[in-house]
Amino acid sequence: MPDTPESFQAQVAALRRSHILDAATMVFAEQGFHRTKIRDVAQAAGVADGTIYNYFENKTALLLGILDRINESDRRDRDFAQLGDVDIRQFFRAYFRHRLDTIGENGLKVLRIVLSEMLVNPELRQIYAERIVAPSFALVETHFQRIVDAGRLQTDDVPMMIRATAGMFLGLIVLRLMGDPQLEAKWDTIPDVLTTLLLDGLLPSEGDNDGATHER
Amino acid sequence: MPDTPESFQAQVAALRRSHILDAATMVFAEQGFHRTKIRDVAQAAGVADGTIYNYFENKTALLLGILDRINESDRRDRDFAQLGDVDIRQFFRAYFRHRLDTIGENGLKVLRIVLSEMLVNPELRQIYAERIVAPSFALVETHFQRIVDAGRLQTDDVPMMIRATAGMFLGLIVLRLMGDPQLEAKWDTIPDVLTTLLLDGLLPSEGDNDGATHER
Amino acid sequence: MPDTPESFQAQVAALRRSHILDAATMVFAEQGFHRTKIRDVAQAAGVADGTIYNYFENKTALLLGILDRINESDRRDRDFAQLGDVDIRQFFRAYFRHRLDTIGENGLKVLRIVLSEMLVNPELRQIYAERIVAPSFALVETHFQRIVDAGRLQTDDVPMMIRATAGMFLGLIVLRLMGDPQLEAKWDTIPDVLTTLLLDGLLPSEGDNDGATHER
Amino acid sequence: MPDTPESFQAQVAALRRSHILDAATMVFAEQGFHRTKIRDVAQAAGVADGTIYNYFENKTALLLGILDRINESDRRDRDFAQLGDVDIRQFFRAYFRHRLDTIGENGLKVLRIVLSEMLVNPELRQIYAERIVAPSFALVETHFQRIVDAGRLQTDDVPMMIRATAGMFLGLIVLRLMGDPQLEAKWDTIPDVLTTLLLDGLLPSEGDNDGATHER
DNA sequence: TATGAATGAGTGTTCATTCAT
DNA sequence: AATGAATGAACACTCATTCAT
């Protein structure tokens, strides 16, 4: 079935938009948002300055576009998260591993820029909060609540537990972005470390030591 | 012992420097780093534009100054951390509570600015990594290693465990700065939530359920 | 006699040209020349941006087109002016009235734009001077010269008298465009006021006062 | 009496402001408002681009400054206008002559720019209407009303008569700016022409012809 | 040491015009 | 002839920094 002319035009437009976004992601990751001039993006994309503005309202909209892409990949991850009916320890490990792989080295560079700008730009932040954080948390909450109800995990406050978990992951990313060499060296152990820490906690198992006890 | 004229001058200078830093902290927290003009800082400090440059090399140096102050308060917290020879659960709770209180609402505003800029400014980042992160982690590592060696806590990798813990704290701050309403509402429960999560983990205690088992 | 295909095409073209000119007149009058974008004209005319350039060389040519239309209506007024063999006072009144009516509220808006641009654009000015001012003045000059020769009007310098008269009219328009409220309120009295002032002058008629005399 | 430091600084500032305004007037007159870049003004004034903005809010404010100067000279002319207790014919001639001389060749160039922009810029227009037109007309109205009451001039509507007169003057300027060669050639006869036309009107004096009569 | 006026490099955005389709 | 996406030159304005006083 051949495309109608309209949809063809639309496809070309979408393609170029995506192309510009690729270029923007690249140069932003390389030079940072503020140091990057529109001209840099244009040159990287092989178009004229003005062409950018046929596809994005302004420079910030380029970041929004990048955010939307992250949004997309997050949406896919949410589906992945629902698969977690298997062994919990394995699921945790696999999920952290998956997120880590999805981000990748390049993703870290982009995250640096996006995080930095989002912290300081309310518009960006709102988009992120509404489109990504809120629905993700909502989904994961129901999911985990079920698991907790089934007695497979134990916590008093599912929403806060989720946030603490997500925060741990995000915080490690931020710490690495801050330049901690230890984290860079052991980046791959994160899934294991987090899984063990979150599931088992830091207290010694009963019988592991000389009788130290603890009460909650 | 009266101050010599030199040291008096020096004290006046230090005072004014501190005064300017107060002003900078305030206006940065309120308007962000980039949106704040040197003139804004000068007016808030009640001095002329040029005077700023007698005490700080450039605009970024103001952030560095703010960072140094955070550094100072962190150094004091490190001492506090060493006091942790009491009950571990109480210590965790008290420590998180202390950090939370130290930051405060206003500190969050400053953190937003400093974090954002640090993510993107290698110079700032290096200072932070060298002066704050590294020594803090080093100190806490030896401290915790001792506790682990004493069998009071259990973990395979103390450095990573510490980073995960610090990351969880930092990540929650970032998530809140991103605008998560849940976190804002339950901000005060963080010490409890984190303590329980970190010490006990998510897995149900033996006997809490119908015999589900887990292996590490 | 049916039109040949060529002339039919030509008619369609002329029609579209005129249509575009209508749109341009409207949006220029509404938003001014510089604030109006070609896209505004195109949208108002219901065509694409590029189409404008099939009918007009550039944006200024649109103003030229508007000027040409004013030219046309002025040509018709010239004929009207020749009808002035009736009572002079009536003719003056009727002529001013006619010009006022011809311009209308909408014409004032257009005049504002055209005048402003013409003052500053030599090309436009030249067209106006050559195509409109010069022939109009030439015609009116011969016409008035005849009337003066016939002793029905009295003046030393017909060309300057005509310019002063035209100037008075134009100047009142400009003053109104400048925002004088008095003129807006009494706009309709202009034909009477001008006629009386021009024909009778300001000096009191003989016998109207206590014998004041004047010499030219 | 030596100036206090404050007033000295203020004087220097006023001087530089005036200097910049001189430069702006010059380059605007030469190249027009829109074609003149801030850099042109700065170079003509021998200062940096940014310095302009220490004295004027924006480019338009430069025009406002020029307008204010015209305002000032007009205020002086108003005083001049009050001197008109002498022979009316002489006063008219002298007044027109004075205005013509005040404007001069250079003033015409400036007027071209200011008029053009004012026609199209409501902000500028309002300033002009409020600060210049209204007070001028108000003053002249009371002045002429007195003369009319004294029977030395005759008119039904003083305000409109004044506007017609001012309009005639303004209109002649506009016509000349439009490029009429006749006006340029006989520019100096304007005071005489206008005076005669306004005072005596166009109708032949009684007895000058073969008995043509007219009624008002 | 404080001042604050002067500096001038730096850039996002607009929009008239072109031209491949 | 119509389209409308691409072009890229153009520019007002900001503001960190300097330095004469």
Image: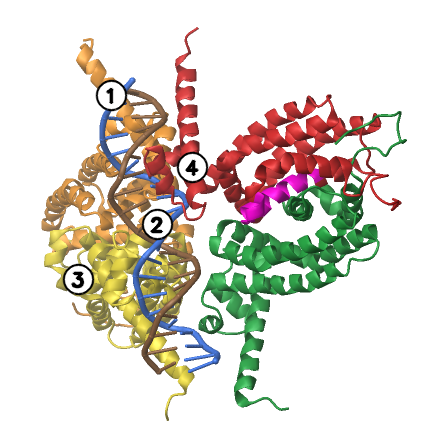
Chain colours: A yellow, B orange, C green, D red, E brown, F blue
Residue B13: assigned label: 1
Return the chain for callout 4: D
**Mark 2 residue type:** Val
- Using the numbered discs, state the Cα–Cα distance from disc 4 to disc 3 in whole angstroms: 71 Å
Residue A190: assigned label: 3
Using the rendered image of the protein, determine whether residue C128 is visible from the camera's viewpoint: yes
- Using the numbered discs, state the Cα–Cα distance from disc 2 to disc 1 in whole angstroms: 32 Å
Please name the residue that numbered disc 4 is placed on.
Answer: D26
The image shows residue D2, relative to residue D128, as above or below, that is: above
What percent of the width, then of the height, locates residue D94? 65, 27
- On-image quarter of the C terminus of chain C: top right
Magenta span includes D191: no
Horizontal relation, residue C160 to residue A11: left or right:
right
Please name the residue that numbered disc 2 is placed on.
Answer: A120
- Using the numbered discs, state the Cα–Cα distance from disc 4 to disc 1 in whole angstroms: 49 Å
Look at the numbered discs 2 and 1 and tell me whether their residues touch, using CB distance below 8 Å: no
- On-image quarter of the N terminus of chain C: bottom right
Horizontal relation, residue B173 to residue D35: left or right:
left
Do discs 4 and 1 share a chain?
A: no
- Label 3: state its secondary structure: helix
Is most of the magenta stretch helix, strand or loop? helix
What percent of the width, then of the height, locates residue B49? 32, 29
What percent of the width, then of the height, locates residue A26? 22, 63
- Label 4: state its secondary structure: helix
What percent of the width, then of the height, locates residue C140? 68, 55
Return the chain for callout 2: A
